[in-house]
Image (spheres, helix red, strand yellow):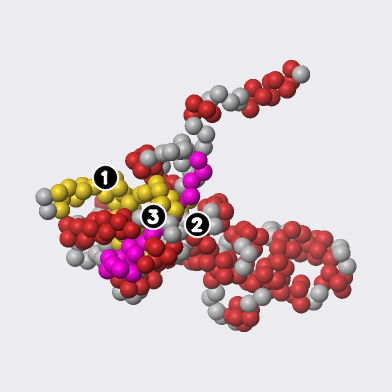
Amino acid sequence: MSKLIKTNNDYKAWVTEIKQHIRQSQFKAAVKVNTELIRLYWTLGKDIVERQSESEWGKGFFNELSQDLKDAFPDMEGFSVTNLKYMKRMYLFYSQSDIIRQQLADELQEHLLFSIPWWHHVVLMTKCNTIEEALFYMKKIVENGWSRNVLMNFIEADLYKAEGKAITNFASCLPNPQSDLAQQTLKDPYNFDFLSMRSGYRERELEDALTENITKFLLELGNGFAYIGRQVRLEIGAEEYFIDLLFYNYKLRCFIVTELKTGKFKVEYVSKLGLYVSAVNHQMRHKDDNPTIGLLICKTKDEVVAKYTLESINQPIGISEYQLAELLPKDFRSSLPSIEEIENELKDK
């Protein structure tokens, strides 16, 4: 009888649904536990600050409180002296904002602050300079499910300052809300420090290096980008052209035509990129896709010239710079002594 049940398709479908419900419940329970934990830490930090605990009970206050809480709750972690000080720091950091302080006073309100794991909070309050920056990264954590290491990498890359800073004409060429989302998606500058490039590299060499490191490049581009191809052929009239790099962004639901330039921005780059954007719209864009976007990534640009250029066209285009840590050429680098060679020479002296 049990064998018949296990081979029944209705039964299999039902069990699959049950498993899905259980997993969803487990996830909701985990989020709920985290929410209550962060609320507890917030309240405890608030009490420590408002009671002026250190002034009232002396320098040994944190050690005493830590031991008392550990004794009372031996199975519960998180009451170390370091953690208690972080709780105080969290309250002092976020309570600078009257709005956040008022929102968090409402115990029924589901605030973004309570959706982030505790050690993510420790990174945010120790690495971010402003509440606005911390809230920016909080949203990214929730949207993308970043681990703590991924979060630290993006903070070190200064995503907060870079994202949404590209010069674009999206506001005039794209409908809302796509124009706002597109603006937030593009960065300026892009950081290509993961590449090892010689000085005097050509555009094709830069393109080769980026495609060889496409996973890291996609991480730098940001969430939502899918790689379509390089040197994508377009037949326009009797001529053929080739797009440097073509992507699709599933959040924007559109193609993104990307051109790379190793020198300073030139006005003529935009007209050619606009041609590619039009061609992709006609030849590749699905009826349900949003308008194609062009992205021009240059080594440097004159902000005013770039801005004026984009005002003169009706294709949605963004212009960004890239940063690249140029390494020593291989032939020169190989002539330098290695760390091991230097250490051995020092030992002999």
| Quarter of the image where the C terminus is located | top right
Label 1 CA crowd tier, 10 Å (few <14, some 14–19, many 20+): some
Q: Is residue 315 left or right of residue 209?
A: left
Q: Residue 135: where, in percent of width, then height?
A: 55, 68
Query: For the point 54% across and 29% down, which residue is it?
Result: 333
Query: For the point 74% across and 20% down, which residue is it?
Result: 347
Going by the numbered disc 1, the residue's amino acid type is: Gln
* Mark 2 element type: loop
Q: Residue 250: where, in percent of width, then height?
A: 32, 60
Viewer can see residue 216:
yes
Residue contact between numbered discs 2 and 1, judged by CB atoms under 8 Å = no
Disc 2 target residue:
146
In magenta, the rendered stretch is 309-326
Going by the numbered disc 2, the residue's amino acid type is: Trp
* Residue 124 in the image: above or below residue 346: below
Disc 1 target residue:
231
Going by the numbered disc 3, the residue's amino acid type is: Phe
Residue 201: within the magenta? no
Q: Nearer the viewer, mark 3 or mark 1?
A: 3
Disc 3 target residue:
265
Residue 310: within the magenta? yes
* First-in-chain label (2 vs 3): 2
Label 2 CA crowd tier, 10 Å (few <14, some 14–19, many 20+): some
Q: Nearer the viewer, residue 16 or 6?
A: 16
